[in-house]
Image (cartoon, coloured by chain):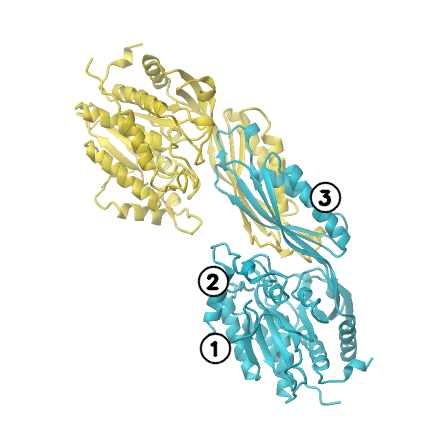
Chain colours: A yellow, B cyan
Amino acid sequence: MMETPSISPDRIWSRLMALGQDGALPGKGVNRQALSDEEILAWHRLIGWGREAGLTPATDAAGNLFLTLEGTSPQLPPVLAGSHIDSQPTGGLFDGAFGTLAALEAVTSIAEAGLRPERSITVVAWMNEEGSRFAPGMMGSELFAGKRTLGEVMAVTDASAISVGDALARVHQAFPQLERRPLGFPIHAYIEPHIEQADGLERAGAVIGVVSGIQGKKTFEMCIAGREAHAGTEPMGRRLDALQAFARVALRMQMETAFVDQAVKFTIGRIEVEPNAPSVVPAHVRFRIDLRHPDNAVLDRLGQRLEFILAEDAAPCAFSIRRLVDAPSNDFDPALRDAIRRSAARHGFPALDLLSAAGHDARQMAPLAPSAMIFIPCRGGISHHPDEWAEPAHVAAGTTVLLDLILEQSGLSSQQGDA
Amino acid sequence: MMETPSISPDRIWSRLMALGQDGALPGKGVNRQALSDEEILAWHRLIGWGREAGLTPATDAAGNLFLTLEGTSPQLPPVLAGSHIDSQPTGGLFDGAFGTLAALEAVTSIAEAGLRPERSITVVAWMNEEGSRFAPGMMGSELFAGKRTLGEVMAVTDASAISVGDALARVHQAFPQLERRPLGFPIHAYIEPHIEQADGLERAGAVIGVVSGIQGKKTFEMCIAGREAHAGTEPMGRRLDALQAFARVALRMQMETAFVDQAVKFTIGRIEVEPNAPSVVPAHVRFRIDLRHPDNAVLDRLGQRLEFILAEDAAPCAFSIRRLVDAPSNDFDPALRDAIRRSAARHGFPALDLLSAAGHDARQMAPLAPSAMIFIPCRGGISHHPDEWAEPAHVAAGTTVLLDLILEQSGLSSQQGDA
C-alpha cells in the first residue's frame, strides 16, 4: 500500500472564509447567485487555487467549472467530485462551497504528495444549483446529464429579464482562455460532500452522514387570474380578488399536505402579484410550490392533491399550472456508501445513515455512474440563511472521508477490499 | 345677468385623449405614476394649454401644479377646481384627468368669452393622489392642507429607493421658470369633478352625481416576521413561515370583515415577500390593507378587528402594524351640493345624490373651505383599469355643471339666489 496524503484543515477553512467574501452580505452570509459578478470573482479564486496545485481548468456549454488533475490513463472516465458555488440571495458560507472546496482540497493534497492517480480526478462546480436567480435550479448538472436541453435552459430569464444565455456569455467572456469541454462526458464515479441542511447529525452526535438517497421533489408554478378593480368602490361580492384566492388556496394546501406525516415538506417560497398596488384589487398571482417526500407514492398523491385544491379553491378566479420539477426519490450506490462508512470508522468519526431532504446535483449523476454524498453537520440545521455554520473539525472530517473515496476510486489506494 | 360662456365638448374630449398619450400602455390605458417622466410630459401639455388661455402656471413645495386666471380682486381667496393627473400603474384615461381637464376647460371658456371674474380661478393638479408609486397617496392635497409635513412626505421612497424629494426635484428642474407659490393658501371654495368609479349613476340612468361625502378609509401596513429556512429540510412543525401566516391572517380578515354588510370594502392590494426565493421558507411578509366604510363607528370597529386578527393569527411569527391613513367619512358643503343639483336640473341632466366610495383630494379641502364633488358615470363602474371609460356626452355634462359652479363662486353669475 502506497503512502496516503492528508488534507490541510487550515487551508480548506481559510479558503471557505475567502470564498465567502465574494458576494458577502453586510454582517454575515453571502449573496452569490448563479452567473453573477460575484460568482465570476469566485471562479477566479477557484481557478487560481487549482492552477497552484497543477489542475487544468475547463468549462462547458452549461457553464459548469471543472478543475482536473490528469491521471496516468487520461482516456479512462475520471472520478468527479464537487458541488456548486452559487448561493441563495441570503445564503450562508457552506452550502455548495464546502463540497466544492473539499474536492479541491482532496485533489490538492494528492497533487502535493506527488501522487499520480491512474484515472483523472476532476473537481466540479455545477452551474446554478440554487435556482433562486434562474428557476428552477440544478441547471448545470441537468444539462450535463441530458435531462434538459441547452435551448430551453438558455432562454430562462431572471427578474431583470436577463437570460441564462446572456449571463453565461458574460461569465465565459471573463475567462477567454478557458478550455471548453464537450457537454457531458463519461464519469467513473461522482462524490458530493455537503452540509446536511437539517439537524439529524447534530442531534445524533454524528459527524459523517452516509446519504442513502435524496427525497423526491415536485415543484409547481401556479397562477391565479382574477380581475383588477378599485379597492374603494368595487363591491366585495363582485370581486375576483386573486390574492384572496391565493390565501384560500395556500391555507388549504398547507392544511391538507403539511401535516400528513413527519417527512413531508410543503413550501410556497415565491409569490408575484400584479399590479401589486395598495388601492387596487389584485388581478394576478403567480406562486411557486416546493413539495418533497421520500416516499414516491405519497409524493405523487400529494402533488395531485395540490393541483386539485387549486382547481377547486381558485374559483371564481381562473388558474393555470406548470409542473417545473418532478424528481422521484433515488438511492445512492451501496458500495460507495460502504466506503464512506469504512472511512469514517477508520478515522473515528461517528457516522449516521440518513436521507437527504434537500435536492442536490448528485441526483442527476446517480443514473450516470456510481454516486454518493457525504454529509457533515451544520449548526442547528440552519441553511439558506446567513447564520448557516459548520464547525472546522467537521469540515476537515468530511474532506478526509472524501479524500479516502477519491484515492480508492482513482486507483491510488487498495482500501476497496479492506473491510 | 351677464352673458354665460359655454364649454367646448370637442376640446375637452380631444385633450383627454391627448393626455392619455403620456404614459400610454400598449393597447389602451395609461401608466403615469406620480412624479414620473410621463407626468412631466403631462405637465408640459397642461402648462401649454393654460398659457394659450392666458392662465399663469405655478407650483409649490408639494409638487402641486396650479393654473390661474387672475380675477379683478386677486387679493381675495381664489376658487379652486381640479383633481390629479397621476395614474395607477395600469390605469385609465379618466381617473383624475377628467377633473383636471374639466377645470381647465371651464376656465378656458371663461377666458375665451373675455370675462374677468372678481375672484381668481385656479385649476389644480394635486401631486400623487394615487399612492401607487409613493404610498400612501393624496400627498399634494394633504401637504397643502397641513395634514402631513414636508419632511415626512419627501422621505418616502418608491420600490427603486427613489425618494419623493428626489423625484420632485427632477420635476421642478424640468420647469425652471415656473413660479413657486407658498405651500397652502386661503381658498374660497373647492370643486372636484371625477368619474364615479362605481356603477351607481349608470344603474340609475343618471348623468350627474351630487356627492354627499367620501366614505371613511383606513390603511395599514402590516408586517409578519418569521424565520428563513431550507424548503427541503426544515421540518414543518419547526417552521416560522411568514407567507403561510399571511395566508391565515388574510383569509380570516376577509371572512370577518368583508361580509359585514354591503358597504364595507376590504382589500389587500400589495404584498412584498423576503427572500421570495422558490426553495426558501419565507422570512418576512409586508402587506397593505385598504379598509373603507361610510359609517365611522363600523370603520373603527373593523379596523380594531383587523389589528386583533393579525396579533392573534400571525403567531408563532412576530408582527408589527403601521397605521398609514385614518380618514373618517365627511360631508360636502350643502350649498354647493344644491348648486350642483340646480345646474343639472337647468341643463336637463338626470342627477343622483350618492356617497363616494373612493377617496379623493376633496377630502382634504373640505375642512378648509366649502367643497364639493361632481361625479359622472364610468362604464360598468370600471376604474383603475385600462378599460376605464366615460362617454363624451357625460364628460361635457360634468364640465358644464362645473362651469356653472365656478361662475357662481367667482362672482361671474347671480345663480346663487336662483332656486
Q: Is residue B302 rendered to the left or right of residue A192?
A: right
Disc 2 is attached to a residue of which chain? Answer: B
Disc 3 is attached to a residue of which chain? Answer: B
Instruction: State the residue at coordinates (50%, 74%).
Output: B44
Q: Earlier in the sequence, mark 1 or mark 3?
A: 1
Identify the residue under disc 2.
B166
Identify the residue under disc 3.
B256
Q: Residues within 10 Å of mark 2 (few under 14, many from 20)?
A: some
User: Which is more foreground, mark 1 or mark 3?
Assistant: 1
Q: Are marks 1 and 3 on the same chain?
A: yes
Compare residues A347 and B203 and report the one nearer the observer.
A347
Query: Helix, strand or loop at disc 3?
Result: helix
Disc 1 is attached to a residue of which chain? Answer: B
Q: In the rendered view of the protein, which quadrant contains the C terminus of chain B?
A: bottom right
Identify the residue under disc 1.
B177
Q: In the rendered view of the protein, which quadrant contains the N terminus of chain B?
A: bottom right
Q: Quadrant of residue B247?
A: top right
